[in-house]
Image: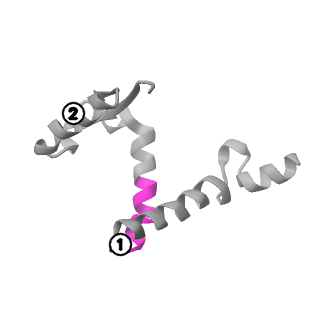
Amino acid sequence: APNTSVKSSLSAMHASSVGQRMKWAVKRGVTIQHIQPGQPQQNAYIERYNRTVRHEWLDQYIIESIEEAQDYATQWLWTYNNDRPNMGIGGITPAMKLKMAA
C-alpha cells in the first residue's frame, strides 16, 4: 500500500487514543504529521471538509447505529460529489457537466 500522510493535531486527540492511532497508522504504512496546536490553517482543507460534514449532515440527525450512519454518509457523499454546484467547474453540478460533455 502506498504511504499516506495525515495531518493531525495532538491536542484534538484524546491522550489514551494517541498510542492506538499510531499503532494503526504504522501497521498500514501511514505517516502522521502533527500540526501545531491552535493552527488549524495548517490543515485548512480537512478542517473545512470536517465542518461541512458536521453542518450538512451530522448535526441534522440523531444517529442510532453504525449502519444508519453509513447510510446517511453514503447519501450525503453522493449529493456532495454529484448533485451540488461545484465552483471548480463553473458553479454547475458534476451531473450537469457530464451531461454537457455527452
Q: Is residue 23 above or below residue 93?
A: above
What residue sits right under mark 2 in the picture? Answer: 23
Position of residue 33 measured from the top left corner of the image (x, y, whole percent):
30, 27
Q: Quadrant of residue 88?
A: top right
Residue 58 in magenta? yes
Q: Is residue 94 above or below residue 10?
A: below
Q: Please give the name of the residue rendered at 24% of the width and 30% of the height, measured from the top-left corner.
A: 36
- Distance from disc 1 to disc 2, alpha carbons, whole Å, reads 29 Å
Number of other residues with Cα within 10 Å of mark 2, as a class: few under 14, some 14 to 19, many 20 or more: few
Magenta residues, dominant SS class: helix
Q: Please give the name of the residue rendered at 40% of the width and 74% of the height, measured from the top-left corner.
A: 61
Position of residue 27 measured from the top left corner of the image (x, y, whole percent):
28, 30
Q: Which mark is residue 63?
A: 1
- In the picture, measured across the screen, residue 4 lies left or right of residue 38, that is right
Position of residue 49 measured from the top left corner of the image (x, y, whole percent):
45, 48
Q: Amino acid at mark 1?
A: Ile
Q: Nearer the viewer, residue 37 or 98?
A: 98
Of the 4 image quadrants, the one containing the N terminus is top left
What's the colour scheme? one colour
- In the picture, measured across the screen, residue 15 lies left or right of residue 39, that is left
Position of residue 90 measured from the top left corner of the image (x, y, whole percent):
74, 46
Q: Secondary structure at mark 2?
A: helix
Q: Please give the name of the residue rendered at 66% of the width and 47% of the height, measured from the top-left corner.
A: 87
Number of other residues with Cα within 10 Å of mark 1, as a class: few under 14, some 14 to 19, many 20 or more: few
Give the residues drawn in magenta, as a range: 51-61
Q: Secondary structure at mark 1?
A: loop
Please say whether residue 37 is visible from this viewpoint: no
Q: Please give the name of the residue rendered at 79% of the width and 50% of the height, measured from the top-left corner.
A: 98
Q: Amino acid at mark 2?
A: Lys
